[in-house]
Image (spheres, rainbow, N blue to C red):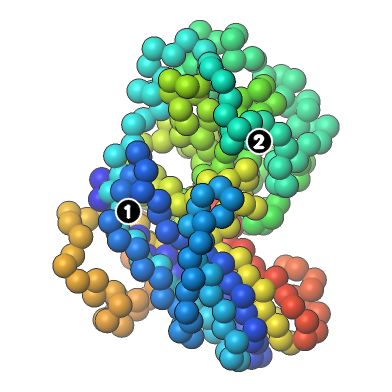
Amino acid sequence: MLFRIIHETKLSYTSPVAETVFEVRMAPPTDEDQTNLGYRLRTTPQATVTSFRDGMGNRVDLFNVSKPYKELVILATSYVRTHRRVGIARLDGVTRLGEGQVGVDAYELLFPSPLVDQCQALDDFVATLPRPGDATSPIAYIESLMDAVRGRLKFETQVTKARTPVSEALALGKGVCQDFAHLFIAACRGVGLPARYVSGYVNHPGEIATHAWCQVWGGDRAGWVDVDPTTREFVGDDHVAIAFGRDYSDVPPNKGLWKGRAEEAIAVSVKVEPIDRVPMEWNEWSQPAARQGMFQSQRMGNMSQSQRMGRSPYPNQRSYTAGLHQQQGEQQQQ
């Protein structure tokens, strides 16, 4: 499938702020599952963008805004063609998950990470899970893990935040796709299967903001198998990956620092639109009407969603000090 993705983040401040250092992970990679046919990033105020690869190989766009401003808008536009080999096909003929040697990169994904932390509730949950060799097939086993996660968490918005660890989500018994992904990863690691977090987008009616799912290591033959524990499915061509990490803390769509005496508010809007072809010219950058209404909820129907978040929940962002403040993150939720 061919998609056009418009991802806009708007940060507003009650007073002018400055000396911003900002990282953005919004560029879809090109790999065996998808092809990036074009990506552009625009900021207002305008800033020079430098790109580099992080430790996981994800593209990161870095920019600074030194002059004072009260509003920062980040607009990323991408054209992506997906051609994913679905996990069921990858696992065809595989008799046991994780067969073969675990590579150095995957070995790290067997251990706890900042947001997939260890706690008694998680240990108790993992103790109830079957082991990879107990199931009739790898497909059935992965489905059983998804069922266990969905049996432990109830989907509910606005109960967790971008930096909520899996231990807190377990205590609440509820969360969003980000929390479902973290618990599925914890389950996999608990039974000895490397698993990693995937940040991206999904073309499903009713979705808001960015989406999160997982990859579990299927072994030398299958490779990484994409699984969406929130919807209990093996990921297909409706999902567009952006970045991969141990958990959300490795791959936030936006992360930064700013300096000033102000409160911060964030609004995020994402439009995922199936299209027939990439246009010869990208009119989004020259026609203001293309951006009109991006922050008006449901104005663009099922393919466009808007998420509004209130004032910063972090105490240091309400303190009105002139020091450095951490910018709010976009929680990935369905």
Residue at 47% of width from left, 22% of height from top? Answer: 220
For the N terminus, the image quarter is top left
Residue 64 falls in image quadrant: bottom right
Q: Position of residue 269 (x, y in %)?
A: 45, 66
Amino acid bearing label 1: Asn
Q: Is residue 2 above or below residue 316?
A: above
User: Badge 1: few (under 14), some or many (20 or more) residues near its Cα, within 10 Å?
Assistant: some
Residue at 36% of width from left, 48% of height from top? Answer: 30
Q: Position of residue 312 (x, y in %)?
A: 69, 71
Residue at 65% of width from left, 53% of height from top? Answer: 249
Residue 49 shows up from this direction: yes
Amino acid bearing label 2: Glu
* 178 to the left or right of 79: right
Tag shown at residue 94 = none
Q: Which residue is mark 2?
A: 108
Residue 323 falls in image quadrant: bottom right
Element class at badge 2: helix
Q: Which residue is mark 1?
A: 36
Q: Earlier in the sequence, mark 2 or mark 1?
A: 1
User: Badge 2: few (under 14), some or many (20 or more) residues near its Cα, within 10 Å?
Assistant: some
Check if mark 2's residue and mark 1's residue have beta carbons within 8 Å. Answer: no
Could you say which is closer to the camera, residue 285 or residue 135?
285
Element class at badge 1: strand
Between the C-alphas of marks 2 and 1, the distance is: 28 Å
Could you say which is closer to the camera, residue 175 or residue 329?
329
